[in-house]
Amino acid sequence: MSLNIEKQMKAQLSDDILNALKLCSQTAAEHDFKIYLIGGIVRDLLLKRKSIDIDVTVEGDAVKFCHLLVEKNYCKILQVQSELKTAKAVFDGDVEIDFASTRQEFYPHRGHLPVVVKIGCSLQEDVYRRDFTINSLAMSLNKQDYGNVIDYVGGIKDLNNKKIRVLHDNSFNEDPSRILRALKFAARFNFHRDAHTKALQEKYITTQRHKDISWTRIKSELKQCFSLNSAKVYDMFLVNENYKLIYGRNPEIKGLEIKTLVDKYNPYYVWLVYLGTILNDANIIEQFCFTRSEKKIFSDIEYLMNNHLSMMNSNYDIYKFFAKRTTESIIVYYLLTQRKEALKYLENLSLIRVELNGDEIKAMGIQNGREIGEILDEILKKKLNGTITKKSEEIEFVKSKIK
Ligand code: ATP
Ligand code: MG
């Protein structure tokens, strides 16, 4: 007998979501479509956890199905991808649902994005393109068996045993980003990879990995993993030798040390602090197509690591070394070198500013730009060593120079 989770749905999903799904169900019945909840949401219902997004798969053409919903005024379409025949729609109460047509995929080049070989295949054929058994469960939204879980690959058993299992032996070769997805789900649910999946992953990382892959998915999964600001994710990343996947270093740092610094100094790009301790291969950095400000973090790390002096004698030396560098890169530099000057800069020195500006000094009677620059620098030195603390003292100092 199959497992029915309609009760669980009612307990866990909002009335707006339940209503939207009922409207989909009615429409499917009227027009002879078969539709299913699929992937994460079914897994999360079974785990009694809140889901991030609602995915519905349509056996057939999901865009056509969405247009039927729109004709009845049940929803508005937000976007359509016509090659894949997927659509995103919004229902009353701001309920967004992603509709996908069932599809079969094929990986002509291992590690590259797949090509679609068939759209509108059976649910069973669709399920086999997925990553793990726990993400391959479907739940019927069809009138005759509404709420029944459809499990072609043993996902329910793996959920009960807290196991992450791939669907076939070629899974990581097809798409190595699944290694990072496994890490994400293991950390999120406190699950473990089953022994065979673990062996396949180790085999991929040690003997089969290569650089000619699509890095977009890897980047996206790394971002998701490290944005969690989780010490555990980082520790597992190193223990499982996932750093080899991105041709990075093992810095032998504890995740907790990174998390403590991230929580204290609040960098904007949390994930790049974690990644910055690992990723140091210029070719891969290039492949990640970082934005300009993301790139700066990596060039700053490189600068700090290559230019640091064995001694930084004065606060002024420390200030000058770190002043134009991103917070993320300074944290990474500290983690990699344990140089306390980095923390002194973040904690104290970075807050010190000369309050007078060039125009004010000019108004006091110094016209030469180079001279003004030198005076500002001298004031900075004095502020950094504590001999000047207030603006009035800065003014006194400039006056003494004029005399
Ligand atoms: P989350 O709760 O983080 O959204 P999810 O399981 O819903 O987890 P998504 O990234 O939203 O994950 O993807 C939706 C579904 O698509 C997954 O459940 C899985 O079945 C499938 N999927 C996603 N990424 C891959 C991949 N790289 N390889 C194979 N199947 C994938
Ligand atoms: Mg999802």
Image (spheres, rainbow, N blue to C red):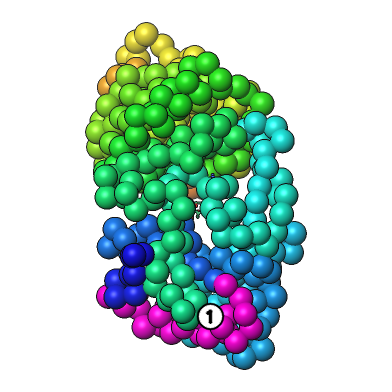
Tell me if residue 21 comes above or below residue 236 in the rendering: below
Residue type, numbered disc 1: Cys
Rendered image quadrant of residue 85: bottom right
The N terminus sits in image quarter? bottom left
Farthest-out residue, top: 310
Please identify the residue farthest to the front as the structure is shown: 1
Instruction: Give the percent coordinates (x, y) of residue 396.
Output: 34, 39
Q: Position of residue 221 (x, y in %)?
A: 49, 42
Depth check: give the residue in front, 146 or 9. Answer: 146
Residue 69 percent location from the top left of the image: 61, 83
Residue 230 seen: no
Which class describes the residues within 10 Å of circle 1: few (<14), some (14-19), or many (20+)? many
* Residue 94 is inside the magenta segment: no
Residue for point 32% across, 49% down: 157
- Name the quarter where the C terminus is drawn: top left
x and y percentages locating residue 168 in the rendered image: 51, 36
* Residue wearing tag 1: 24
Toward the bottom, the furthest residue is 72
Relative height, residue 337 to residue 157 (above, below): above
On whether residue 12 falls in the magenta region, the answer is yes
Residue located at (37% from left, 45% from top): 185
SS type, badge 1: helix
Q: Which residue sits at x=66%, y=89%?
A: 71
Q: Would residue 268 appear left or right of 258 to someone viewing this image?
A: right
Image position of 255 (left or right of 291): left
| Magenta-drawn segment | 10-34
x 42%, y 76%: residue = 146
The front one of 197 and 246 is: 197
Residue 184: which quarter of the image?
top left
